[in-house]
Image: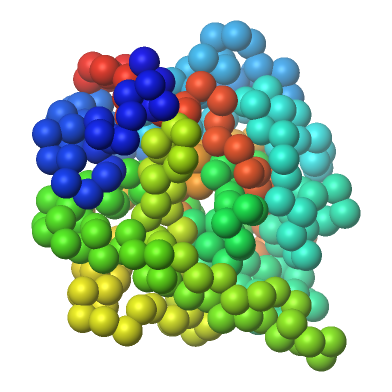
């Protein structure tokens, strides 16, 4: 039964649906990945998945909203994320102004972007976030791919947290924390202004929201403290502080991995961060990133499926 048929009354993410939430919570905790190794799928070529490889990636994304693949495809080939995305039902790229002309972003240390204050293009740590938290609702980022061409000499590790587990942890602490972050004005990203005027309008919205139609949980979040405005009320302040403590603490749900050449992350825009790194000038770190408006096909309404542990 899909999310639309099940209806909002059965949605575990809706305030007040305590019985539906309890059933979903128990399934989620029983089946979730315990380590990054549980996310791993070995593939021959991400540009041409076998039916079995695709099924394993989708199964993990349905369970954990993400998968990590490993392959021997290590060349500078931007068709890797594009062709992989197409196989997973991802078609609408977010062609943001930092992306390359083809819509795929090359993540590497870049002088111009770094000097403009864009942290992904430096060697610094990137704090916890979901991609596109500054986008308007019509350009909501639901899926994201990262493909590693070259890793750093040291550092540059990736930490991930299924956003559904972040919601679960908050709701288990206190349901009011989750509700505070579902307010329509919980998190505001001020407009970005350059010498030509407003380059990107302000974006105001919730942190957690329920997708119309499928009932999936979406999250927009950044742990940044600059160019961010949280709703000025005690409930939102308490929820934001507790969420950051869960991310930076020892919840047992954060998974850590290192993407090596030929490896990649496929996800429904889960929470993620990157550690600082040291580059090798002879082979500088390079990853390709693709952001999509769609969720990974086959994961829509996964909350409504009566999953069993390990599925």
| Residue found 41% across the figure and 71% down from its top | 185
| Residue found 60% across the figure and 76% down from its top | 202
Looking at the image, residue 153 lies above or below residue 23? below
- In the rendered view, does 105 fall on the left or right side of 42? right
Image position, residue 128 (x, y; %): 43, 63
Residue 245 in view = no
Image position, residue 65 (x, y; %): 43, 36
Residue 92 in view = yes
Front residue of this view, candidates 267 and 232: 232
Please tell me in which quadrant of the rendered image residue 214 appears: top left
Front residue of this view, candidates 207 and 307: 207
Image position, residue 121 (x, y; %): 67, 68
Front residue of this view, candidates 105 and 139: 139
Instruction: Identify the image quadrant of the N terminus.
Output: top left
Image position, residue 63 (x, y; %): 36, 28
| Residue found 71% across the figure and 28% down from its top | 86
Front residue of this view, candidates 80 and 306: 306
């Amino acid at each position: 039964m899909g999310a639309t048929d099940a209806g909002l009354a059965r949605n575990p993410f809706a305030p007040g649906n305590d019985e539906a939430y309890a059933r979903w919570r128990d399934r989620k905790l029983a089946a979730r990945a315990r380590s990054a190794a549980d996310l791993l799928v070995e593939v021959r070529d991400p540009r041409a998945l076998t039916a079995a490889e695709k099924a394993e990636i989708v199964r993990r994304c349905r369970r954990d909203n993400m998968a990590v693949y490993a392959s021997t495809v290590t060349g500078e080939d931007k068709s890797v994320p594009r062709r992989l995305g197409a196989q997973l039902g991802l078609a609408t790229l977010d062609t943001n102004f930092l992306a390359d002309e083809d819509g795929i972003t090359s993540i590497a240390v870049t002088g111009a972007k770094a000097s403009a204050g864009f942290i992904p293009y430096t060697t610094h740590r990137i704090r916890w976030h979901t991609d596109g938290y500054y986008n308007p609702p019509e350009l909501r980022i639901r899926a994201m791919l990262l493909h590693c061409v070259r890793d750093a000499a040291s550092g540059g590790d990736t930490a991930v947290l299924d956003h559904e587990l972040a919601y679960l942890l908050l709701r288990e602490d206190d349901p009011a924390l989750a509700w505070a972050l579902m307010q329509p004005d919980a998190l505001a990203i001020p407009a970005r202004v350059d010498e030509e005027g407003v380059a990107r309008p302000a974006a105001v919205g919730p942190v957690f929201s329920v997708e119309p139609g499928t009932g999936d949980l979406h999250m927009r979040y950044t742990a940044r403290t600059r160019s961010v405005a949280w709703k000025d009320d005690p409930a939102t302040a308490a929820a934001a502080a507790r969420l950051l403590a869960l991310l930076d603490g020892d919840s047992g749900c954060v998974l850590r991995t290192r993407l090596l050449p030929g490896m990649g992350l496929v996800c429904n825009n889960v929470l993620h961060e990157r550690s600082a790194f040291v580059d090798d000038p002879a082979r500088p770190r390079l990853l390709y990133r693709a952001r999509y408006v769609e969720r990974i096909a086959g994961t829509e309404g996964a909350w409504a499926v009566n999953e069993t542990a390990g599925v």
